[in-house]
């Protein structure tokens, strides 16, 4: 991994032999730790059925509430219309024949005649109050004697019913002073004009019990609920076979997806093994043979007195051996066999051995590596970060001393890679230049895993990389 350094010979060697540490150097966090995205639970037919039943219950509750409200409004409208029709019939057939002009003058006989008719033929379970109003708001008759003769302000609807003769029905507001003797919280109020034999206009008003609304609303709601519930149950019965088939197809599709993912991973590993095997058995072996042939030719040329040619052949042999070493390191990078076979500790040990030949004196602190319980993805991430940071140390800080430490801290699995090389100025991370491929790769790998990657460095103070895997990804 490339990062710009401030090469100074004295700084490069200043910390040689000392403990590689950069704890007192400000640390820059390159990626933020975050919990991994939750994996959706596997599809379960039982869970889908339960969710469907819960949704059905919610729909029934909502529809029931809306139906109850609609039934109440419809029943109220029907009851108001019925009360208006009843009031019209009573006004024409019962009240008007009993009226006389003397009623307006407060004649006791006229008042008694109307009261007899009202109590015998009007009042009952439905009609609970009757009033006759004069146009000025005086109550000329009421079945409640305490109201007779009292004067109240007529409402706008009452005045309109007198001005434009018609029947008006509504739910009564019992908070008005004229209703002080009414019982209950709501009544149906109907009023319409009537006329005495002499043509004097009066306002006939009846109050009907609201119980009829409640009874009718219950009837409507039960009918509506019966139709709704039976329709939804029928819909569930009709959809059940289709739902079962769909669930089976989804389960099969999920199993196929899992198999495809497994095969993809296996194919990736197999392809890397094939590439590594091809390189090892082909170019690497041929280069080894070439190095031996060049070394033998150098010896023969030296024996025949061709010293210059022998020197060139030895240089060629050394270059070939160096390339063999590079290829073998590349093979370990492509497919570290010990990571899958012997585990993370063994793979890191092999990585340390390959790094030692590059001028890096490496110490491993892996006492807990076997007990961390990392998943394969986390092990690959730890290995890759270690690999990149050590390669960086070998490229820019060698010869130097480095240390790899893997431990658990406060529930986190923490990887630290320290070197006592020349270090670099962290301000360059504010605007990374082209070519820092290794740094970008590390940042992407850590970000994809939801891990925190941080670096602490300064000129002459070495470099310290820190990778912290999130708690959700680390077994307790």
Image: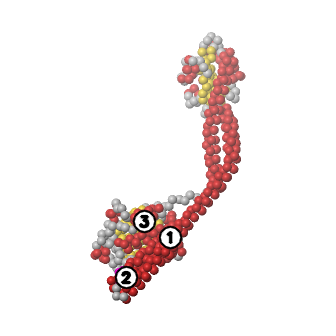
How packed mark 1 is, by other alpha carbons closer than 10 Å (few <14, some 14-19, many 20 or more), is some
The rendered magenta stretch, by its main secondary structure, is classed as: helix
> Image check: 307 left or right of 266?
left
Judge whether 296 appears above or below 407 on screen.
below
How packed mark 2 is, by other alpha carbons closer than 10 Å (few <14, some 14-19, many 20 or more), is some
**Labelled pair 2, 3 in contact (Cβ < 8 Å):** no
> Image check: 228 left or right of 177?
right
Question: Which residue is tagged 3?
Answer: 442
Distance from Cα at disc 2 to Cα at disc 1? 30 Å
Distance from Cα at disc 1 to Cα at disc 3? 23 Å
Kindly identify which numbered label has been placed on residue 275.
1
Q: Residue 219, image x and y in percent? A: 69, 36
Q: Residue 449, image x and y in percent? A: 48, 63
Quick check: can you spot residue 157?
yes
Provide the residue span drawn in magenta: 311-315
Kindly identify which numbered label has been placed on residue 444.
none
Q: Residue 27, image x and y in percent? A: 37, 66
Give 117 or 193, whichever is nearer the viewer. 193
User: Which structural element holds mark 1?
Assistant: helix
Which residue is situated farthest in the front direction here? 304
- Could you tell me which residue is drawn at 67 percent across and 38 percent down? 224
């Amino acid at each position: 991994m490339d990062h710009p350094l401030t090469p100074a010979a004295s700084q490069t060697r200043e910390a040689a032999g000392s403990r590689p540490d950069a704890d007192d150097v400000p640390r820059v966090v390159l990626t933020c730790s975050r919990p991994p995205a939750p994996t959706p639970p596997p599809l379960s037919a039982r869970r889908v059925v339960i969710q469907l039943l819960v949704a059905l219950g919610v729909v029934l509750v909502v529809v029931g509430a809306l139906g109850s409200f609609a039934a109440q409004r419809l029943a109220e409208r029907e009851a108001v219309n019925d009360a208006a029709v009843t009031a019209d019939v009573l006004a024409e057939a019962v009240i008007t024949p009993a009226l006389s002009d003397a009623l307006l003058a407060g004649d006791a006989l006229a008042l008694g005649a109307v009261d007899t008719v009202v109590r015998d033929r009007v009042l009952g379970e439905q009609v609970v109050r009757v009033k006759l109003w004069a146009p000025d708001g005086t109550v000329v008759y009421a079945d409640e004697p305490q109201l007779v003769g009292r004067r109240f302000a007529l409402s706008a609807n009452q005045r309109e019913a007198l001005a434009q003769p018609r029947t008006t029905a509504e739910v009564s507001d019992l908070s008005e002073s004229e209703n002080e003797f009414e019982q209950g919280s709501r009544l149906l109020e109907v009023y319409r004009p009537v006329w005495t034999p002499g043509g004097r206009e009066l306002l006939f008003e009846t109050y009907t019990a609201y119980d009829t609304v409640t009874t009718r609303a219950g009837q409507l709601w039960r009918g509506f609920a019966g139709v709704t519930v039976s329709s939804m149950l029928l819909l569930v019965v009709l959809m059940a076979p289709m739902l079962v088939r769909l669930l089976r197809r989804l389960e099969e599709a999920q199993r196929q997806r899992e198999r495809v993912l497994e095969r993809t991973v296996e194919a990736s590993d197999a392809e890397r093994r094939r590439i590594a095997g091809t390189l090892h058995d082909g170019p690497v072996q041929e280069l080894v043979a070439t190095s031996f042939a060049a070394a033998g030719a150098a010896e023969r040329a030296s024996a025949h007195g061709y010293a210059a040619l022998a020197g060139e052949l030895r240089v060629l042999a050394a270059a070939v051996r160096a390339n063999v070493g590079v290829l073998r390191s590349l093979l370990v990078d492509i497919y570290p066999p010990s990571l899958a076979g012997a585990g993370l500790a063994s793979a890191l040990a092999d990585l340390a051995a390959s790094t030692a030949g590059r001028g890096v004196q490496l110490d491993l602190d892996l006492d807990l590596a076997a007990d961390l319980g990392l998943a394969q993805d986390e092990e690959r991430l730890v290995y890759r970060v270690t690999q990149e940071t050590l390669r960086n140390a070998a490229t820019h800080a060698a010869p130097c001393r480095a240390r790899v430490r893997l431990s658990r801290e406060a529930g986190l699995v923490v990887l630290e890679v320290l070197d006592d090389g020349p270090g670099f100025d962290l301000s360059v991370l504010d605007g990374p230049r082209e070519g820092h491929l290794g740094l970008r790769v590390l940042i992407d790998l850590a970000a994809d895993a939801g891990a925190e990657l941080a670096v602490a460095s300064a000129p002459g103070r070495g470099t310290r990389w820190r990778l912290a895997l999130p708690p959700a990804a680390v077994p307790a």
